[in-house]
């Protein structure tokens, strides 16, 4: 009966070694894609450039595809294979820049660029992963800036008118003081002459 115990102990060791080798082999075989989206929500204003940043990793060659989904429909933006071709749709021809890590940059965004951006990274063995970025695009409200500009112009005009009015008042006061001083001088001279005549 003793030999059975020894076989059982060896069987556990052989099973553990086999399991470790199988796990190592599974990790070395091609397959498996990972994708990280560091900023899933982006807020932008009209005419701004935005970066849809991602980072992917895989063992083989990957195909990256970006799509835009909004209330106006679904549009394929770009598709490329790492190190090979880049296929940009005509709508985004001069507005998109691709990067090796899977990120894209959209230039001069408009209100129609708001929505969901989906990235699909597919490895050559068929494994794929997905990511989503939500983009909100806001218009710059010029009415508020227009109101402030008009108010500033109005206040500047009122201040200029008040400054002119104060200058005119100052000049008038100086003229009045000169006339009064001249009259006083003339009347004092007359009084002095009268006093001398009386004496």
Image (cartoon, rainbow, N blue to C red):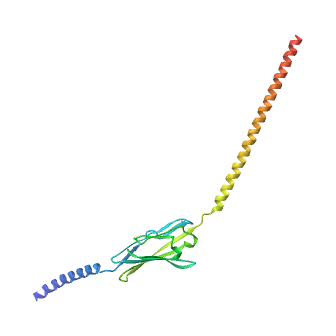
Q: Position of residue 3 (x, y in %)?
A: 10, 87
Q: Position of residue 23 (x, y in %)?
A: 26, 80
Q: Quadrant of residue 9?
A: bottom left
Q: Residue furthest top?
A: 199
Residue 67 visible in the displayed image: no
Q: Residue at x 51, y 73 (%)?
A: 93
- 153, 79: nearer the viewer: 79
Q: Residue furthest left?
A: 2
Q: Quadrant of the C terminus?
A: top right
Side (left or right) of 15 relative to 55: left
Q: Is residue 21 above or below residue 53?
A: below
Q: Is residue 124 above or below residue 190?
A: below
Q: Quadrant of residue 72?
A: bottom right
Q: Residue at x 58, y 70 (%)?
A: 111
Q: Residue at x 21, y 83 (%)?
A: 18
Q: Residue furthest bottom?
A: 1
Q: Position of residue 91 (x, y in %)?
A: 53, 75
Q: How many numbered circles does the render carry?
A: 0
- 21, 180: nearer the viewer: 180
Residue 64 visible in the displayed image: yes
Q: Is residue 61 above or below residue 192?
A: below
Q: Quadrant of the N terminus?
A: bottom left
Q: Position of residue 110 (x, y in %)?
A: 57, 69
Side (left or right) of 116 relative to 141: left
């Amino acid at each position: 009966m003793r030999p059975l115990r020894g076989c059982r102990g060896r069987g556990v060791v052989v099973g553990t070694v086999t399991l470790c080798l199988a796990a190592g082999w599974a990790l070395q075989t091609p397959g498996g894609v990972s994708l990280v989206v560091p900023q899933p929500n982006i807020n932008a204003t009209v005419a701004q450039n935005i970066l849809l940043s991602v980072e992917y990793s895989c063992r083989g060659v990957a195909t990256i595809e970006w799509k835009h989904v909004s209330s106006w429909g679904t549009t394929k933006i770009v598709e490329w294979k790492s190190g090979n071709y880049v296929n940009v749709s005509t709508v985004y021809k001069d507005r998109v820049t691709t990067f090796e890590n899977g990120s894209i940059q959209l230039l001069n965004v408009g209100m129609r660029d708001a929505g969901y951006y989906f990235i699909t990274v597919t490895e050559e063995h068929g494994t794929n992963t997905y990511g989503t970025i939500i983009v909100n695009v806001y218009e710059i409200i010029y009415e508020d800036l227009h109101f402030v500009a008009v108010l500033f112009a109005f206040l500047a005009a009122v201040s200029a008118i008040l400054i002119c009015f104060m200058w005119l008042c100052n000049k008038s006061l100086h003229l009045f003081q000169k006339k009064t001083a001249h009259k006083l001088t003339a009347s004092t001279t007359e009084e002095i002459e009268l006093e001398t005549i009386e004496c």
